[in-house]
Amino acid sequence: MFKVLKTSIVEFSADVEEFFDGETIEEATKKAHYQSMPGELAKINITDCKVVKEAIKIVGKEQHGSKKSSGTESTATGGEQKNV
């Protein structure tokens, strides 16, 4: 049995909604302005997804119950590489 590892780089576009509280409107607005990443309670709706790059590598081959490296890697971008 073979084992492969797939690595993907994906770009997402999303709509994000998040509530901010403050004693004044200025304090709540300031918190919202300085927030760089969505918080745990933010509502996130993914609107678009684009695969930038993918790579698939053979990471091992199991022979007769023991794991053994196959010695080569294959990638989705093409070609075969020898492990050194």
Image (spheres, grey):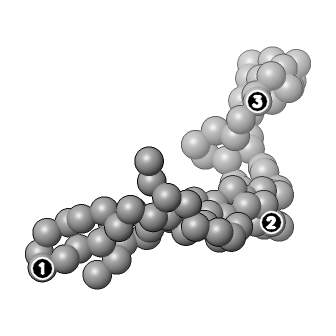
Between residue 58 and residue 21, name the one nearer to us.
58
Does any portion of residue 66 appear in the rendered image?
A: yes
Residue matched to label 1: 64
Q: Is residue 25 above or below residue 61?
A: above
How busy is the neighbourhood of tag 1: few (under 14 within 10 Å), some, or many (20 plus)? few
User: Seen in the image, is 73 located left or right of residue 20?
Assistant: left
Amino acid on which disc 2 is placed: Lys
Residue 58 position, x and y percent, is: 44, 67
Residue at 44 percent across and 48 percent down: it is 84
Callout 1 amino acid: His
Alpha carbons under labels 3 and 1: distance apart = 52 Å
Q: Quadrant of residue 29?
A: top right
| Spatial separation of the CA atoms under disc 1 and disc 2 | 40 Å
Q: Whole-Å distance between the Cαs marked 2 and 3?
A: 22 Å
In the image: residue 51, left or right of residue 39: right
Q: Is residue 14 above or below residue 18?
A: below
Q: Earlier in the sequence, mark 1 or mark 2?
A: 2
Sequence-wise, which precedes: disc 2 or disc 3?
3
Q: Which residue is mark 3?
A: 36
Secondary element at image label 2: strand
Question: Contact (CB < 8 A) between labels 3 and 1?
Answer: no
Residue 72 location in percent, x, y?
45, 64
Most foreground residue, 52 or 27: 52
Q: Secondary structure at mark 1?
A: loop
Of 79 and 16, the residue lying toward us: 79
Characterize the local packing of mark 3: few (<14), some (14-19) or many (20 or more) Cα atoms within 10 angstroms: few
How many numbered marks have been drawn onto this rendered protein structure? 3
Q: Residues within 10 Å of mark 2 (few under 14, many from 20)?
A: few
Report which residue position mark 2 lands on.
50
